[in-house]
Image: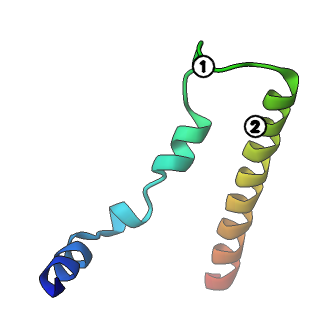
Amino acid sequence: MQNETQEKTKGNSLKEFFSLGEVGGYFFRRNDPNRPSNINLKMMHGINKLSIAIFLAAVVYMVVKRFI
C-alpha cells in the first residue's frame, strides 16, 4: 500500500498540478443536444463561469502582488 502512494506522488508533476481539465472542460465544451435548455439553466451556467473567471483572476492578482 505504501508503494502505491509513493508511486502516485512520484508521478505528480507541475504540469498535472496546473492542469485545468474540469475547469477548462466547463468553459470550452460543445452544446449537448440531449441536454435540456432553458433560460434558468443558461443564466446559472453564465453566473458560474463568471464567478470562476473572477476567482482565477483574483488568485493571479494575489500571486503577482505577493512576488512583485
Check disc 1 and report the residue beneath it: 31
Give how far across and how far down residue 66 sits, in percent. Answer: 66, 84
Q: Amino acid at mark 1?
A: Asn
Question: 55 or 29, which lies in front?
Answer: 29
Identity of the residue furthest to the bottom in this view: 2
Q: Residue at x 77, y 56 (%)?
A: 54
Question: Where is 39 relative to 56, above or below?
Answer: above
Q: Residue at x 12, y 82 (%)?
A: 3
Count of marks overlaid on the render: 2
Question: 68 or 29, which lies in front?
Answer: 29
Q: Residue at x 17, y 77 (%)?
A: 4
Check disc 2 and report the residue beneath it: 45
Question: Where is 66 relative to 34, above or below?
Answer: below
Give how far across and how far down residue 52 sits, in percent. Answer: 71, 53
Q: Residue at x 53, y 43 (%)?
A: 24
Q: Marks 2 and 1, Cα distance to the nearest angstrom?
A: 12 Å
